[in-house]
Image (cartoon, rainbow, N blue to C red):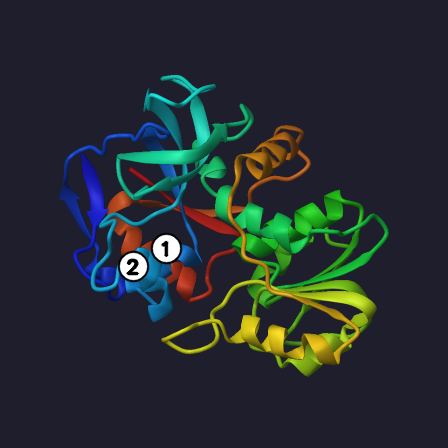
């Protein structure tokens, strides 16, 4: 089968399109014929091995799994001995292992809604589960600000917050204003031209780069500041924002959260219901062919993606 393979950590260009053996599913896994695989910040971490703390999971010297990729949508080819509820021919989406390939194994997948294409479904698991985690506890009528609303996690956070009945102020750059306006936000703010003001029950900061003091001023007393992503903190640990929230918790009456999201079947099934009902819709920007994974990762890291991007074998 064709797959994007890396023998070492480095920039996206370390990936090469090669012919390798098809993987075999474990007892709790399914083998998928990949129709589309999502590209997110986690794939950049897999390829580069940064921050170095992540190599405890990815492999200390070289990648344990030479084919990166997590988000996936495809068709079940075979099932492991302990798999129940799925059979060959089922269309599924979720999180797999080595999804930048024609075939991949997966443990956390659920049936794909019939109204979604595989390209749309491949954008859901990582980003939408992260958005769900960031919005834990949000209630109808609350005011929510989403900073970084035009990216993968942001586009789902805006839609989900609006679906839960919140009034959403979405913050993004000028190139993504049109996209974000269509996601259900009550107000859209171009951060390059407008100051961030007001008080909110929940502020979800996905973009990073703003001082804690500025973010906390946006949170009402008793409200919550949720930090998504760990892009700050250097090449070694990359947990600067989460550590900063931990240090500040005892000194503020406002809640500080830096949750870690793991895609689970319960969350995927909840999202599947919302997607099937049309309550939320994947914001799909571009599709890249499998051999162009390095270009796709670079496109994402350069901040060009409006919503999500995927690759297709």
Task: Using the image as rendered, state which of residue 289 and residue 101 is in the foreground.
Answer: 101
Mark 1 secondary-structure assignment? helix
| Rendered position, 281 above or below 308 | above
Q: Is residue 58 left or right of residue 188?
A: left
Q: Which residue is rendered at x = 24% and y = 52% of the image? A: 64
Residue at numbered disc 2: 47
10 Å crowding of disc 2: few (<14), some (14-19), many (20+): many
At horizontal 47% and vertical 70% (from top left) the residue drawn is 231
Image: 84 above or below 254: above
Residue that carries the numbered disc 1 in the rendered image:
43
For the question of whether residue 254 can be seen, the reply is yes
In the picture shown, does residue 155 fall above or below 191? above
Q: Is residue 82 left or right of residue 273?
A: left
Q: Please tell me how crowded label 1 is: few (under 14), some (14-19), or many (20+) other residues with Cα within 10 Å.
A: some
Label total for image: 2
Which quarter of the figure is the C terminus placed in?
A: top left
Of 282 and 239, nearer the camera is 239
Secondary structure beneath label 2: helix
Q: Is residue 184 above or below residue 51?
A: above
Percent across and percent down for residue 238 are: 44, 72
Residue at the (30%, 43%) spot, across then down: 98
Position of residue 165 measured from the top left corner of the image (x, y, whole percent): 80, 46
Q: For the N terminus, which image quadrant?
A: top left
Q: Is residue 194 visible?
A: no
Residue 13 horizontal/vertical position (percent): 22, 61
Q: Are marks 2 and 1 in contact (CB under 8 Å)?
A: yes
Rendered location of residue 195, percent (x, y): 72, 78
Q: Could you say which is closer to the camera, residue 234 or residue 39?
A: 234
Distance between the alpha carbons at the discs numbered 2 and 1: 6 Å
At horizontal 26% and vertical 58% (from top left) the residue drawn is 59
Residue 71: image tag: none
């Amino acid at each position: 089968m064709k797959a994007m393979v890396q023998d070492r950590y480095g920039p996206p260009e370390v990936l090469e399109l090669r012919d390798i053996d098809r993987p075999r599913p474990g007892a709790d896994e399914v083998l998928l014929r990949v129709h589309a695989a999502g590209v997110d910040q986690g794939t950049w971490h897999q390829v580069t091995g940064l921050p170095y703390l992540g190599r405890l999971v990815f492999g200390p010297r070289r990648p344990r799994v030479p084919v990166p990729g997590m988000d996936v949508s495809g068709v079940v080819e075979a099932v492991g001995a302990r798999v129940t509820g799925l059979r060959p021919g089922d269309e599924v989406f979720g999180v797999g292992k080595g999804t930048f390939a024609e075939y991949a194994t997966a443990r956390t997948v659920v049936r794909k809604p019939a109204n979604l294409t595989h390209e749309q479904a491949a954008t859901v698991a990582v980003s939408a589960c992260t958005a769900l985690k960031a919005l834990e506890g949000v209630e109808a009528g609350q005011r929510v600000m989403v900073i970084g609303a035009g990216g993968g996690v942001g586009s789902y956070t805006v839609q989900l917050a609006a679906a839960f009945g919140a009034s959403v102020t979405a913050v993004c750059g000028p190139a993504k204003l049109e996209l974000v306006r269509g996601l259900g936000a009550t107000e859209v703010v171009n951060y390059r031209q407008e100051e961030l003001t007001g008080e909110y029950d929940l502020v979800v900061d996905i973009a990073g780069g703003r001082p804690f003091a500025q973010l906390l001023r946006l949170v009402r007393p008793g409200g919550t500041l949720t930090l998504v992503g760990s892009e700050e903190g250097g090449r070694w640990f990359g947990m600067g924002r989460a550590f900063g929230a931990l240090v500040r918790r005892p000194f503020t009456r406002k809640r500080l959260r830096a949750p870690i999201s793991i895609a689970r079947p319960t969350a995927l099934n909840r999202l599947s219901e919302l997607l099937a009902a049309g309550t939320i819709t994947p914001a799909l920007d571009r599709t890249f062919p499998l051999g162009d994974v390095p270009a796709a990762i670079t496109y994402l890291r350069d901040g060009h993606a409006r919503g999500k991007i995927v690759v297709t074998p």
